Image (cartoon, helix red, strand yellow):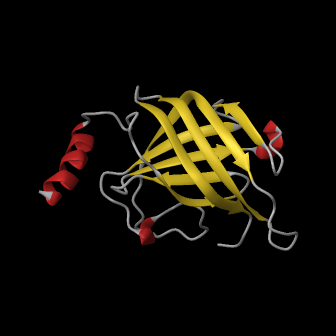
Amino acid sequence: MRLAQRIFPVLLLLLGCGPAVTPTSTFTPHVGCGDVFVVGVDATRTRFLKVNVQRSDVNAPHGQTVTLDVDGQHVTVEMDVYAFPVSASDERYCTDVLSGTAARPTTIKASSGTVTLVVGELASASNPTFPVTVRLENVKFSDGSTLGAAELKDVTVGWYAG
């Protein structure tokens, strides 16, 4: 039964049936970096939710909470959809080193929605990382699918080697 539960969604995706995301999709924080790039992953490891906010362009200082509209330029939301589960060695998020055999996803861009960004304090001058929480609401994707709500909580972002 477990194998059938894992294969059926992949078959639907391959056949083009069903939406990329649903209002009840659950994403867990996966990785973060930059200023601010956050990635969440679903339980099947076939869908990666990416949120990119150019903090300097949207006035989101440390210690503040801001609510922003997805605009495709300063605030972007995308969904990477893979045909099969992605292993840790094939990931392409927040790394400078990509595997030559890394799977290539289909990327679906959001056309609208709301992003609430809770920006934590900078760790220190010598460690320019900080926690963020990203809440998404009413995100509509270019393929017609929607994401009613999702939260990626306490993800460490910032600039560091790797």
Residue at far right of view: 125
* Rendering coords of residue 67 (x, y %): 70, 33
Q: Is residue 161 left or right of residue 111?
A: right
Q: Quadrant of residue 154?
A: bottom right
Query: Where does the N terminus fall, quadrant-wise?
Result: bottom left
User: Which residue is depicted at the point 36% across and 38% down?
Assistant: 20
Q: Is residue 135 above or below residue 155?
A: above
Q: Is residue 159 above or below residue 40?
A: below
Q: Is residue 145 left or right of residue 125?
A: left
Q: Is residue 85 left or right of residue 12?
A: right
User: Which residue is depicted at the point 30% across and 51% down?
Assistant: 83
Q: Is residue 27 above or below residue 90?
A: above
* Rendering coords of residue 50 (x, y %): 55, 47
Q: Is residue 114 left or right of residue 15?
A: right
* Rendering coords of residue 49 (x, y %): 49, 47
Residue at far left of view: 1
User: Which residue is depicted at the point 74% across and 37% down?
Assistant: 66
